[in-house]
Amino acid sequence: MIPGSKAVDTMEETSLLKTLMAQIKEFRRPTILTPVCMIGEVIFEMLIPLLMASIIDNGIETGNMHHIVTTGLLMLLMAAGSLATGVMGGVFGARASTGFARNLREAMFDNIQTFSFSNIDKFSTPSLITRLTTDITNIQMAFQMTLRMFVRAPMSLITAMVMAFIINARLARIYLAAVGFLAVCLFLIIRKATGYFRKIFPRYDDLNESIEENVRGIRVVKSFVREDYETDKLRKASGNIYKLFTKAERMVILNAPLMQTTVYTCIILISWLGAKMIVAGNLTTGQMMSLLTYCMNILMSLMMLSMVFVMITLSQASAKRICEVLDETSDITNPENPVMEVADGSIEFRNVNFSYKTADSDAPEEARGKPAEKGNARTGGKERVLHVLHQINLTIQSGETIGIIGGTGSGKTSLVNLLSRLYDVDEGAVLVGGRDVRTYDLETIRSKVAVVLQKNVLFSGSVLDNLRWGNENATLEDCRRVCRIACADDFIEAMPEGYNTRIEQGGSNVSGGQKQRLCIARALLKDPKVIIFDDSTSAVDTATDARIRNALIHELPETTKIIIAQRISSIAHADRVIVMEDGHVDAFDTPENLLADNRIYQEVYESQVGGNADFDEMLPEGELHVHARRGGEA
Ligand SMILES: Nc1ncnc2c1ncn2[C@@H]1O[C@H](COP(=O)(O)OP(=O)(O)OP(=O)(O)O)[C@@H](O)[C@H]1O
Ligand SMILES: [Mg+2]
């Protein structure tokens, strides 16, 4: 162990506690009232054995009926008091803990909404889900238990012990020995179990990952007949949890026999020694009865305490994982005096370098998703840095139509993601409308630079709801107009309820091409200065693809259009084309010039339009002769 690491641990724990406790907020009252009620319960409970002793010694043995009745009534009153405070403590505890969990969940969710793409890369989606569900439930349970038991158990332990000593110090020493023995045993058990518990929660990430992936991709799983493989994967993930839990519980379960043996040993000892004392006249029957009751109290408190400790250690890992999400700050934030207007659609990349930083999946779990430490460039061996764009320099005029081609993984998506600040550059600058994108208000830049993402999703709701993600104030007429441009109007109107047709979650009830066209329409509604199509017409037939492109040119002459495509026909009409290779710009020129002297462009062209022509060759009218002409030139 590193010297001083204990101090660091304590400091870390204090800051965890501070972050968590800040979420109690409006539930401070029940949070305080719960232990107060529990203290009340202990006081009432502790008085009962005393009263019982009095009934036996002063009532039954002397035949004093009046004393029996009045003390009996008093006992009833105490029992009622204990019940009432106990119930109230339970109610306040439940209120405080559920409220606390709600606040925590909301705070986490709110913070996740501010995350940038790279923040999300750092935590994985399944991990975020586990943190929002299992981890919060854990904390909620630990919090409730702590509120109810953490004050009650030691207080009841001490009070019962004091009472026992007051009644008979010699016999009470038996308890002291029992408590000492149990405390040592419990400490050892818990220490062993904690080690297992700490390992369990990260394993839930794997379980959730497996479940999420499978359920989300259930259609693919079925079509590839991978059910067995997936079931196996899940079995492994849940088997891991099962194994760890069994190991931990096997330790914790030792509590029960240990406790019982100790309790019964104490009872036998007290009865045996107590009986002798009664015969010798040093102890009354009533006193012995109360001693036996206190015996149960003491040992039950100890049991409760051990449970609280298990729960707290169990929840420590969860607390840490929750705080990581709460403390994570988005690395893409609004500048101080943001620019609220994007002048035009001109674009410039100046010496841009960019890399992805992802959690190192080989690193131990604690290291994953760890908040960035300021100043250490977010590496420190726990993050993997992947350089994907090198020294990009480009200048694009407003209104131009730009094509981007390049092999998969060449950095096309990464390049355009910088334009709307989905990611920020490492070095250099990206300018839109003559200004660095980092000087704009985030909402402004994201609405003026619209992206039709490569992996796009629709949300459950009507077609109109989905379109209005682009602009919530859009009228039906606006929606119709953009759908015409995106060639989506035909199929929408053919749907049973037209624009009010419900889209299922993830857009599962529309085809791939229909989904792409809806996403294009949605982006167009933003009335952007720059619009980026990241492989957005890959599922649309070539004729429709050409119709969409023509409509864009005519309807949005001012808007800069950036089209990433695998199909050469999708970019052959562009003013200029960027050819990407391995994160570099290999060439940036007109399609004609590229066809004349760029090797990559020529290869793609040849494979698609040249000798081994395929379906893509069936180009719509107008483009056929362009290609024919170009083919002639080449
Ligand atoms: N979120 C991410 N985290 C880490 N690495 C990433 C991430 N996204 C992309 N990469 C990596 O960056 C490189 C460039 O990816 P990019 O998505 O820009 O390629 P692309 O040219 O768009 O490919 P495609 O034509 O297949 O869409 C790839 O090596 C990819 O593995
Ligand atoms: Mg891509």
Image (spheres, grey):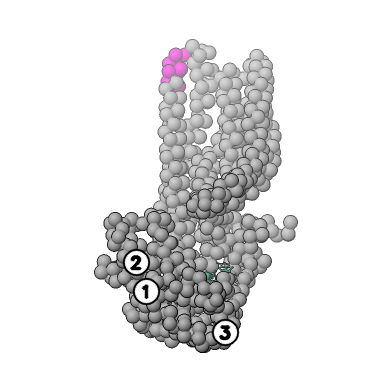
- Specify whether residue 258 is painted magenta: no
For label 3, the residue is: 598
Please name the amino acid that badge 2 sits on.
Ala
Q: Which residue occupies 25% across, 69% down?
A: 477
Q: How far apart are marks 2 and 3 (CA)?
A: 35 Å
Q: Which of marks 1 and 3 is nearer the N terminus?
A: 1
Label 2 secondary element: loop
Q: Which of 37 and 605 is in front in this view?
A: 605
For label 2, the residue is: 488
Q: Nearer the viewer, residue 389 or 276?
A: 389
Q: Work out which quarter of the rendered image holds the N terminus and state it.
A: bottom right
In the rendered image of this protein, does residue 436 appear above or below residue 61?
A: below
* Side of 161 relative to 128 (left or right): right
Residue 90 x/y as whole percent: 45, 38
In the rendered image of this protein, does residue 206 appear above or below residue 561?
A: above
Q: From the image, give the main secondary structure of the stretch colored magenta.
A: helix
Label 1 secondary element: helix
Res. 363 image quadrant: bottom right
Q: Nearer the viewer, residue 540 or 238?
A: 540
In the rendered image of this protein, does residue 436 appear above or below residue 423?
A: below
Residue 56 x/y as whole percent: 52, 17
Q: How far apart are marks 1 and 2 (CA)?
A: 11 Å
Q: Are marks 2 and 3 in contact (CB under 8 Å)?
A: no
For label 1, the residue is: 547
Q: Work out which quarter of the rendered image holds the C terminus and state it.
A: bottom right
Q: Which residue occupies 53% across, 65% down?
A: 119
Residue 421 visible, this angle? no
Q: Which residues are the magenta region?
A: 64-71
Please name the amino acid that badge 1 sits on.
Arg
